[in-house]
Image (spheres, grey):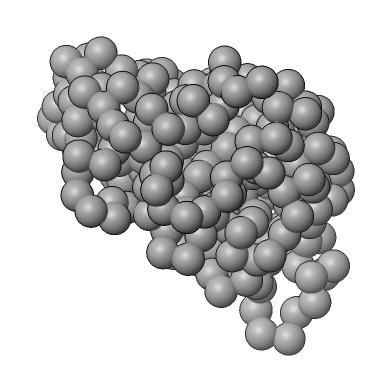
Amino acid sequence: MIRIGFCCAPEDAARAAAAGCDYVELNFSSIARLGEAAFARAKTALEQAGLYAEAMNSFIPAAFALIGMQDDTALKAYLKKGFARAQALGATVVVFGSAGARRLPRGMGKAEGWRALAPYFRLAAALGEAYGIVIAIEPLRYAECNAVNTLREGLALVELVGHPNLKLLADMYHMGENGENFEDITSAADILAHCHIGRPDGRTWPLPDDAYDYGPFFAALKCIGYNRRLSIEAGPKNGPGDLAVSVTFLRNLSSKG
């Protein structure tokens, strides 16, 4: 069965647990930047909530502009520190969204940009592997990034990089905003490592009465036998009480059929 999680800060882990979440998804760069005392408090917050941070996002800050980087020493140090902390909190997958870090310079074509980015995806995959952490490329909607926007592009980039620890993420919000066909998910059966969800047109927590058809997304996941994780990456429509409703709704959708 698909595990349902919530993208939040460590201090919100208790709320996620109360809403019925199976895990939380934390901000990688925020965790990497914490002082030792603050990191210990974050770890304690998860332990008290009884949840692990099985996934993390917000991987590489925009300050690390990947294309054109001359010296990756600082990047490697940042990644190693972050991976060690992610592992300590229970993470097994880190999402490589990072729109600012991977953005293509003006005038650079996608093919050239992908060739320039490929070594950094390969580096992240290799370093993550040493900590037992899979890297999942997140295709981002056109409005947020000019590099790797669709699931099909993400699949092509995974194949270009060619590292066994580099996988793919399917985000229902980004796919919906782009107008992609959710059936494209079936092409990624072998490399789909993680999923995000939020209602397109508003990016709110999915609810049974929000007038959006989530069926095609879950039908595609069911078609490939997906049974990993699905993180709610969105905000409330009405209030915090909606989170428990959303978790129950998604768990019912994922178990149908």
Could you say where residue 106 lies in the image, as x and y percent from the top left?
A: 66, 85
Is 204 positioned to the left or the right of 74 in the image? left
For the residue pair 45 and 85, the one nearer the viewer reads as 45
In this orientation, does residue 66 appear?
A: no
Is 95 positioned to the left or the right of 107 in the image? left
For the residue pair 97 and 118, the one nearer the viewer reads as 97
- Can you name the residue that lies furthest to the bottom here? 107
What is the quadrant of the N terminus in the image?
Answer: top right
Could you say where residue 225 lies in the image, as x and y percent from the top left?
A: 73, 21
What is the quadrant of the C terminus in the image?
Answer: top right
For the residue pair 218 and 37, the one nearer the viewer reads as 218
Q: Which picture quadrant has residue 38?
A: top left
- Which residue lies at the image location 28% right of the left edge and 51% below the top edge? 236
Could you say where residue 256 lies in the image, as x and y percent from the top left?
A: 60, 23
Total numbered circles: 0
Q: Is residue 181 above or below residue 256?
A: below
In this orientation, does residue 2 appear?
A: yes
Q: Which picture quadrant has residue 101?
A: bottom right
- Which residue lies at the image location 66% right of the left edge and 50% below the top edge? 120
Q: Is residue 243 above or below residue 1?
A: below
- Which residue lies at the image location 28% right of the left edge and 32% below the top edge? 244
- Which residue lies at the image location 77% right of the left edge and 27% below the top edge? 224
For the residue pair 155 and 104, the one nearer the viewer reads as 155
Could you say where residue 22 lies in the image, as x and y percent from the top left?
A: 38, 20
